[in-house]
Amino acid sequence: MSGERWEAVRQQAIAVLKLNDGGDWTRASPSLYPHQWSWDSACIAVGWAHIDPLRALRELERLFDAQWSTGMVPHIVFDPEVGEDAYFPGPGQWESSLSPAAPHVATSGICQPPIHALALRRVWELTPDHQRSEVLAGIRRLYPRMLAWHRYLADQRDPERSGLVTVYHPWESTDNSPRWDSVLARIEVGDLAPFTRRDTLHVTDAAQRPTDLDYRRYLWLVELLKQRRYDDASVQREYPFLIKDVFFSAILVAASSVLLELADVVGAARTDREQLAEWIRRGRDGISQRFEPDRALCFDYDLRADTPIRVRTFACFAPLVAETPDTVQQAALLKRLNSTDYCGEPRLRWPLLPSTSPAESVFEARNYWRGPTWPVVNWLLWRSLCRLGHVDRAEKLRQAALAQLASSGLGEYFEPFTGESLGSDSQSWTAALALDWIAAKRN
């Protein structure tokens, strides 16, 4: 890309963040997602750090103000100024107040991948000298909250101490991914109140979104969580959707590594450092156990069925995201990444990692997490490749990602063969990650 095209994307990205700016937080998109989403917000903070590091800190602080007493960071913090009918399911469907752990604000009752520490580290890296003391004060406020967030995931979501986080709902990770098909097929949906979906009203083609049947299953899982008052111990005893998610677990490892790197910055206690080191070790060990050398891929595990979920998706590259020190695994995964099952598929408009392998029978090029490319996935992979020292491969990924955004705009996700922007337009986290890619230097 020429410098002129890069600058055009940069200006467009800044405009999107300002369009969706809610003051101390940022809407995920103008209409489809009018509230604050957890992992979106972490990515958004990365983008704001390129404009104003203090604004980036406020983004994270507003999110963590809604942290539950268990340490969980909810996946949605609802804006009380937005009408109940603007987004479904809203606070009335979640009833987060059923849990004694819930905060004073309305939230959902589940969580999303913990990439917030990655954002905190990026904010510190981008802080100019004249703002250093103010930003450091904010990082010191957030650090213990992020530590509590990681502790919740490492303890409450992994009581087996397997190193793998248990997810309770497709919305905690990748909505309608075929990773969950076999699990959802076993779920018998009970009585649900009549409802009207809002997501399909904001896209040109409803086929880009999860099916109505899947949506009913999602809502039924929410009802089951509410019946258990969102209590982790109760959920893990009786609940039907319990998945050891290797992608989610890999992000926890990467984020814990960053918190450990920030320990000197904030003056963290020795016990905190030891705990972080243990979570990193345990997580990498757990992910390694789910890696299958004969397939050169890593797979989720269905606790209820006691079996791996062998579907080829982006999550199979979890060891790279967790920055595995195993060079044999790295080499095998990079070979698979470049194969025709993934980025080497000749029909791809750009060699970017699709959400589901085009070689899978369940692949759907236009359907949400069943085939399209997502900037957040490729940003996480790019970041990990940089840290692992695979700088040439990382640079190819960055260039392809920026070419996609320059050509197709700052959408939610993209058709992998044509490059068409799908889902919501003016997506905040896409804009934010574009700013980070543009600012990145080779090596």
Image (cartoon, grey):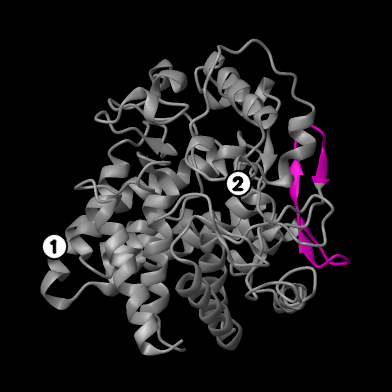
Residue 423 appears anywhere in the view: yes
SS of the residue under disc 1: helix
- Numbered circle sitting on residue 134: 1
**Residue 441 in the image: above or below residue 221:** below
* Mark 2–mark 1 CB contact (< 8 Å): no
Q: Is residue 296 magenta?
A: yes
In the image, which disc is placed on residue 174?
Answer: 2
Q: Quadrant of residue 227?
A: top right
Tell me which numbered mark, 2 or 1, is placed earlier along the sequence.
1
Residue at coordinates 61% horizontally, 42% vertically from top-left?
A: 209
Is residue 377 shown above or below 336? above
**Residues drawn in magenta:** 290-308
Q: Position of residue 280 (x, y in %)?
A: 55, 59
Confirm whether residue 101 shows in the render.
no
Query: Is 322 colored magenta in this rendering?
Result: no
Task: Determine which quarter of the picture holds residue 157.
Answer: top right
Q: Residue furthest front?
A: 204
Judged left or right of residue 240, residue 384 is: left
Name the amino acid, label 1: Glu
Kind of residue at badge 2:
Thr
Q: Position of residue 420 (x, y in %)?
A: 57, 63
> How far across and how far down the image is residue 333, in percent?
73, 72
Answer left or right for 410 relative to 287. Answer: left
Picture coordinates of residue 423 (x, y %)? 52, 50
Disc 1 residue crowd, few under 14, some 14–19, many 20+, Cα 10 Å:
few
- Above or below 114: residue 343: below
Occupied quadrant, residue 10: bottom left
